[in-house]
Image (cartoon, rainbow, N blue to C red):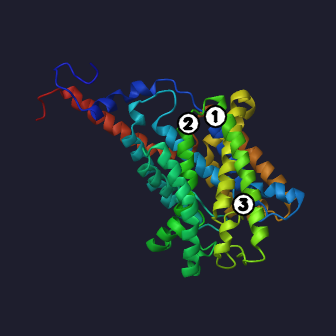
Amino acid sequence: MSGIPAAGIPETRSTDSLCRREQHRQRPRRRLLGIDAARAIAVLGMVMVHFGPTPAPDTALGNLYGLSHGRASVLFVLLAGVGVALLVSDRSGDRSPERSPALVRGRLVLRGVLLLPLGLWLEGFDHGALVILHYYALYFLFMALVLTVPDRWLLVGGAAVLVGGPLLYLWGQTLAPELFVRGDTASLDDPVGKIVDDLLLTGAYPLAIWATPLLVGMWIGRRDLAAAPTRWWLLVLGLAVALASAVAAALATEGLAATFAFGGPPDEQPGEFADFLTDRPHSQMPLWMTGAVGSACAVLGGMLLLAERLQRVTWPLVATGQMALTVYVGHLLLLAAYPELLTREEVPAAFLTVGVFMLLALAACTLWRAVLPRGPLEAALSAPWWTLEWVLRRVVTARRARGPGTGR
């Protein structure tokens, strides 16, 4: 039997699992390429926000360009939740040792520890963007805590954060408005207290608000994403939720504008509690988050359908999504080095610049993936965990080779 060595002395389940990991790793596993394609769409949206005018002008072309504002980053975060759920188990019944919750938690914690200084370091560059990577560090730690929470509690938690987070945010703005100045984000030079405040509540992507797409993404990741009905459900229901949120916000703000003074952008004045009904991008309010989560679900469902039917056509998107960290960090560094070359105040020029950049990124990622399985930063982020696993396997193998009764 697999858990009993020749001497008849049972080994622990964790030791046996470590020794069998290589066998499980050889088992073919179907990757959902649509998730990678959706991640590339998120990268495209964030590049559009950082390269072009924000907010975009209120014209037909400007509104088209501005669709990504307040939605691309939510898509990014929702996909993080989906990916973490798939780390534990997919719907194929795979329960290999490397998918055990304990090992996945270890990977998430280590990944968070690595991303925190990287994000804070990037925030110190003069690129004008709000970096999300150090928030991802906290997101991974949070998801490690709720990794095995039952499905219904993921949804209950997401709904509670959807309402309670914005109320806490608005209450904090009334008590200490100086802490909520958009653009005054934490970096490596700041004290720990400011970094913690920024990550939890006062920053651009605080956990108190953004836990909603994380929890929803984890719930979605536990569904059968390989099934066509699930994909169509994500697409259609996501579009319906996004549209309903926009209509509800428009009706609410129009109906109450004469009664309540709606606050301006967060970097101009503190938000008022009437802002609770707005869907302004990055307002951190429920209707905005609901609409952004809905559009993120629609993009995920659409990309899952397209990647299944048009694999060759969508492969450049898939390759770019698999190298999303490299492209994201690269565009920030280029933006800091060549702002006059990449930033545009006119929408047509911004479309052209973003289009050229993304075509180059798609080509570079496609060529890279044709040779290597991971992008440079993706490999660097995974290398510490691979090293740790390799050491653990060597230790366990050496222990088994000595046999019972030796070294005691």
Measuring 45% from the left and 43% from the top, which residue is drawn there?
150
Q: Secondary structure at mark 1?
A: helix
Measuring 75% from the left and 47% from the top, which residue is drawn there?
358
Contact flag, marks 1 and 2 (Cβ < 8 Å)? yes
In this view of the protein, can residue 365 be seen by the observer? no
Q: Nearer the viewer, residue 333 or 238?
A: 238
From the viewer's perspective, tell me whether residue 25 is left or right of residue 232: left
Earlier in the chain: of badge 1 and badge 3, it is: 3
For the residues marked 1 and 2, what is the alpha-carbon distance in whole angstroms?
A: 8 Å
- Place of residue 60 in the rendered image (x, y in percent of width and height, measured from the top left): 89, 57
Vertical placement of residue 292 versus 104, above or below: below
Which disc is residue 50 wearing?
A: 3
Q: Secondary structure at mark 3?
A: helix
From the viewer's perspective, tell me whether residue 49 is left or right of residue 349: left
Measuring 41% from the left and 51% from the top, which residue is drawn there?
145
Residue where numbered disc 2 is placed: 223
Residue where numbered disc 1 is placed: 230
Q: Nearer the viewer, residue 362 or 178?
A: 178
